[in-house]
């Protein structure tokens, strides 16, 4: 291991997609970045299916050639068998520049991103753990580290911290005490890998297949030509009850057999791995940014895997954190405004995914409800719309592209913390979220366009030609006046 410097401008804790994304973008913009990762890559990680939204971020990172050279399984759409209904959406029909994504082995994908970060000037140290963070008031200023193998230890000082430490959530769990689990999504995932399975006939390449079953739902993901990840998700209470009557393997196999589609796809296949189990993984931190720090990826929040938003939110939040910090360090925007922008934007995007997931977990909802909910979360004008007209909105939301556009084109001023807290509380209490409008979008075609009239508190992200935040002009005094006005309540 190369020596860890005693100081750095930005310290990133964690080398997963969020950390690799944020550190790469900052290094490419000329900033001194040190990344500390406790594991040595490649390392195993679940979460193999990626949304279309990762594609523009890969381009922004300058990693397109490396990603394409990995020859990941192409993913062009999703097949749903849910609540007795079946439908598909085909991303090749999206009106945007990116019409497909990847299924990946996360150990390969994550290592590609981390090695690319190194090639862009990020000082990466693997096999190193952070044991303590030190503060000056509420601001983190240094961290104690130790290398797992050699026992070597030291302290590194920094100006800014991006916590991308995943589920460990160093800042949220150990210092802020801000992580809250969502009651409605206290689920257990059980999965294994199969060799020799068939692909469903959908008319597009590499479909992700999602099927509801009596105990929960099943994912069926083609990872390689003849390897599939097949998982069962059920509520933790149902999982606990089942363990009194059957083994985890029996629960898993019984639910696979309960779906005629999954049973048929797996008929020629053999299970070639041990069983994996993960539980209690849906949560959000009450604070996603503060004095000198940002929480990105799973360190900040994670929603149920049903809509495959994990890597999307990780890379998207890493991109936003880098944009915020770049502008702060260049003196373009105050730190207070940048952290407030990040918190509001990231939190709102998380809530939107939570609301959409909650739609699917209501067994009384049909596909029309899912399409309509997607429309209410992405468009303003619903007058005269038929449910068959709403499928494009569902596809656009499911692609993840809408979140990236919102960071540059949002009207969140009325979406205050109190309102978002209300929605989160309803989700925690396992009630359906209100059928209300959260966002306003521009055109259907995705781009990096800038629409300052819809800035968030006078700010919006820009990624090209320069990474950062753009201030549309309000003074700090005007900004403070808006925050304290009755309309913001």
Image (spheres, rainbow, N blue to C red):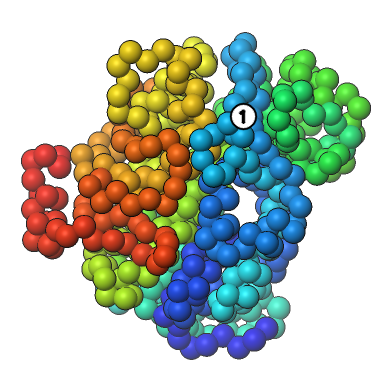
Task: Examine the rendering and report whether any part of residue 443 can be seen.
Answer: yes
**Residue holding disc 1:** 90
Q: Quadrant of residue 111?
A: bottom right
Q: Position of residue 251 (x, y in %)?
A: 74, 26
Please state, as top left, top right, bottom left or bottom right, where the C terminus lies in the image: top left
| Residue visible at 47% across and 59% down in the picture | 318
Relative to 224, residue 296 above or below: below
Q: Position of residue 266 (x, y in %)?
A: 84, 27
Q: Nearer the viewer, residue 290 or 97?
A: 97
Image coordinates for residue 30, horizontal then vertical, percent: 45, 79
Identify the residue at image location x=25%, y=45%: 454
Quadrant the N terminus occupies: bottom right
Seen from the viewer's position, the closer of residues 34 and 471 is: 471
Is 282 in front, or is 433? Answer: 433
Q: Residues within 10 Å of mark 1 (few under 14, many from 20)?
A: many
Secondary element under disc 1, as helix, strand or loop, is strand
Residue 275 appears in the figure: no
The residue located at (73%, 35%) in the rendering is 206
| Residue 371 image point, x, y percent | 47, 21
Please, is residue 228 above or below residue 316 in the view?
Answer: above
Q: In the figure, residue 488 lies in which quadrant?
A: top left
């Amino acid at each position: 291991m190369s020596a860890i410097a005693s100081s750095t401008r930005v310290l990133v804790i964690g080398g997963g997609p969020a950390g690799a994304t944020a550190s790469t973008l900052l290094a490419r913009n000329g900033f001194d970045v040190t990344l500390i990762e406790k594991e040595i890559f490649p390392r195993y990680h679940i979460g193999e299916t990626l949304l279309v939204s990762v594609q523009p971020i890969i381009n922004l990172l300058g990693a397109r050639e490396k990603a394409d050279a990995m020859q990941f399984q192409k993913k062009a759409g999703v097949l749903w068998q849910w609540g007795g209904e079946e439908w598909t959406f085909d991303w090749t029909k999206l009106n945007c520049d990116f019409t497909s994504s990847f299924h990946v082995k996360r150990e390969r994908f994550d290592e590609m991103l981390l090695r690319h970060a190194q090639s862009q000037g990020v000082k990466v140290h693997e096999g190193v753990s952070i044991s303590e963070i030190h503060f000056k008031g509420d601001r983190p200023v240094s961290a104690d580290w130790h290398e797992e193998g050699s026992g070597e230890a030291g302290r590194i000082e920094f100006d800014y911290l991006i916590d991308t430490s995943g589920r460990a959530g160093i800042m949220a769990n150990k210092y802020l005490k801000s992580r809250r689990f969502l009651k409605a999504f206290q689920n257990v995932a059980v999965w294994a890998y199969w060799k020799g399975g068939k692909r469903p006939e959908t008319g597009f390449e590499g479909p992700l297949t999602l099927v509801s079953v009596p105990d929960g739902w099943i994912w069926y993901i083609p990872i390689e030509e003849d390897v599939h990840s097949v998982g069962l998700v059920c509520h933790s209470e149902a999982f606990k009850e089942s363990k009194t009557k059957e083994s985890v393997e029996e629960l898993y196999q019984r639910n696979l057999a309960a779906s005629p589609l999954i049973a048929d796809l797996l008929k020629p296949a053999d299970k070639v791995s041990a069983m994996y189990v993960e539980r209690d993984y849906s949560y959000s931190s009450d604070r996603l940014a503060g004095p000198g720090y940002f929480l990105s990826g799973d360190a900040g929040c994670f929603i149920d895997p049903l809509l495959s938003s994990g890597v999307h939110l990780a890379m998207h939040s890493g991109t936003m954190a880098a944009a915020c910090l770049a502008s702060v360090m260049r003196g373009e925007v105050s730190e207070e405004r940048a952290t407030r922008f990040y918190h509001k934007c990231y939190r709102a995007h998380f809530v939107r995914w939570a609301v959409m997931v909650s739609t699917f977990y209501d067994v009384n909802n049909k596909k029309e409800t899912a399409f309509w909910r997607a429309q209410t979360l992405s468009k303003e004008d619903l007058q005269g719309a038929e449910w068959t007209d709403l499928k494009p909105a569902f596809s656009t939301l499911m692609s993840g592209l809408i979140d990236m556009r919102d960071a540059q084109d949002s009207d969140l001023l009325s979406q205050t913390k109190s309102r978002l807290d209300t929605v989160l509380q309803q989700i925690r209490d396992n009630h359906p979220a209100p059928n209300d409008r959260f966002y306003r979008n521009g055109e259907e075609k995705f781009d990096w366009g800038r629409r300052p009239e819809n800035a968030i508190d006078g700010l919006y992200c820009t990624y090209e030609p320069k990474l950062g935040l753009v201030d549309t002009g309000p003074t700090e005094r005007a900004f403070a006046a808006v925050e304290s006005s009755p309309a913001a309540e």
